[in-house]
Image: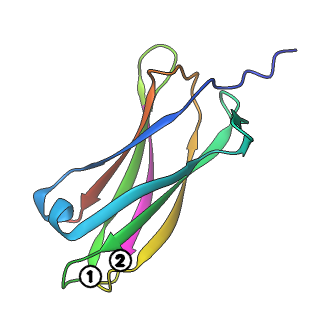
Amino acid sequence: MSRGLIPALAALVLFQSASAEAQVRARIRRVGLFEGTQPWVRSGCTSFVDVEFANLGSDVFEGEARVNQQDRDGDVVTCVEEVGLTPDGHWQLKQIYFTAGAGTPENTLQVRLFDRN
């Protein structure tokens, strides 16, 4: 029986508004589980992406992070996690869960950050 491992998941963080882009920094730390360089993410199973956010602004940031990935027939599957960040500039880890699709090296996992406005 094939394990159905996803060959590779690339991740990209995008900002939806200019205010979020000016106020918050983000970096992807990890996508799913790995053993060495081999991903252990099965298509159709729940996995996660670790994203660190830092609020460099002077106000509290409230919004949501959305993880987007295409499924086998091209539909976009979106998972949402609420994000609240204090204006202290410290990196804060958010683990966002999603259902892994049948990925290919060119199938990018997108994390988009939206503010409440």
Residue 47, percent from left and from top: 64, 44
Which coloring applies here?
Answer: rainbow
**Above-or-below relation of 51 to 1:** below
For label 1, the residue is 60
Specify which label sits upstream in the sequence, 2 or 1.
1
> Which residue is painted at 82% across and 16% down in the image?
2
Residue 102, percent from left and from top: 58, 21
Where does the magenta region start and end? Answer: 77-84
For label 2, the residue is 85
Secondary structure under tag 2 reads strand
C-alpha separation, residue under disc 2 versus residue under disc 1: 6 Å
Callout 2 environment at 10 Å: few (<14), some (14 to 19), or many (20+)? many
Q: Nearer the viewer, residue 69 or 23?
A: 23
Check the picture and name the quadrant holding the C terminus: bottom left
> Which residue is painted at 37% across and 74% down in the image?
84
Query: What amino acid type should be assigned to the residue bearing mark 2?
Result: Leu
Tell me if 105 is positioned left or right of 37 in this view.
left
> Which residue is painted at 43% across and 52% down in the image?
80
Tell me if 108 is positioned left or right of 15 in this view.
right
Residue 13, percent from left and from top: 34, 48
Callout 1 environment at 10 Å: few (<14), some (14 to 19), or many (20+)? few
Q: Please report contact status of discs 2 and 1: CB closer than 8 Å, yes or no.
A: yes
Check the picture and name the quadrant holding the N terminus: top right
Query: What amino acid type should be assigned to the residue bearing mark 1?
Result: Val
Tell me if 92 is positioned left or right of 42 in this view.
left
